[in-house]
Image: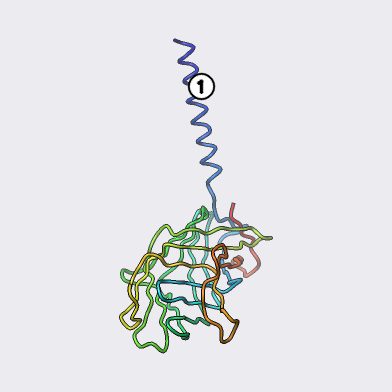
Amino acid sequence: MKATRILVLAVAAVCMLSGAVASAASAQEFVAKEYPVKVKALNKNDQGFQISGAVSVCEGAEFEGEGTEASPTLTVHPEYFECEAELGSKHNAKVNTKGCNYEFFATGSVNIVCENTGEEIEVTVEGIAGCIIKIPAQPNLETVTYENITGEVEVRAEVSGIHWSTTSGCKLSPSSGTNGEYREGLFKGGRPTGTPELAPINHPAKARTAGTNEFGAFDAIEVT
């Protein structure tokens, strides 16, 4: 009985140690060489967002944030430019992200967080009176991956299950859902007359993230 008890304790200890090692291995953080660090990312391809009955594609995007220490999360403010939407026909669109940010997790998910209750990301479809696509604050959106490239980080987002709603002016049915998708966008037929649409699955939206220190000099960052 004594030998059996010792064996059981030994197995338990090995399991606990293995769990601790696995936990340590899975812990990931955004790390900069120097702090504080200012982070800025520019899109490397068109950014696309699709809901039932509509899709928008933006040719330009910027994401800015800052950090004071290594952290498992990085919060950035997104801005989108030169956007077009397809909703029955093609329209110019404007994206308003005031008060809302993306909280990226180094483990591969992202939260949409807004500073005040009721604030949402809004895509205004121009040329359709009263048509606004709204994306509220929401947690645990997946999936985001990262690649460290010579002191910078390439962020690749292919996210699904996004909650959304539309105003009555859009005349969409349904007018809300949880099936929004974010990944690379494209213009079928080419610019400038092509139709906005999402790229096929496995084509993530990409952005290259770089850091600068308090003196404006390059500051290497990575996900470790």
Q: What amino acid does circle 1 point to?
A: Ala
Say if 114 sits above or below 91 in the image: above
Q: Residues within 10 Å of mark 1 (few under 14, many from 20)?
A: few
Say if 114 sits above or below 131 in the image: above
- Depth check: give the residue in front, 79 or 122: 122
Q: Position of residue 25 (x, y in %)?
A: 56, 43
- Depth check: give the residue in front, 159 or 51: 51
Q: Position of residue 196 (x, y in %)?
A: 52, 79
Q: Position of residue 91 (x, y in %)?
A: 46, 86
Task: Report which residue position mark 1 lands on.
Answer: 10
Label tally: 1
Q: Position of residue 83 (x, y in %)?
A: 50, 81
Image quarter of the N terminus: top left
Question: What residue is drawn where x is 35% and y is 81%?
Answer: 170
Q: Is residue 216 left or right of residue 101?
A: right
- Depth check: give the residue in front, 98 or 130: 130
Question: What residue is drawn where x is 49% and y is 82%?
Answer: 84
Question: Residue 125 falls in which quadrant of the image?
Answer: bottom left
Q: How is the image coloured?
A: rainbow
Residue furthest toward the right?
A: 150
- Depth check: give the residue in front, 31 or 209: 209
Question: What residue is drawn where x is 52% and y is 77%?
Answer: 58
Question: Residue 44 falls in which quadrant of the image?
Answer: bottom right
Question: What residue is drawn where x is 42% and y is 57%?
Answer: 140
**Element class at badge 1:** helix
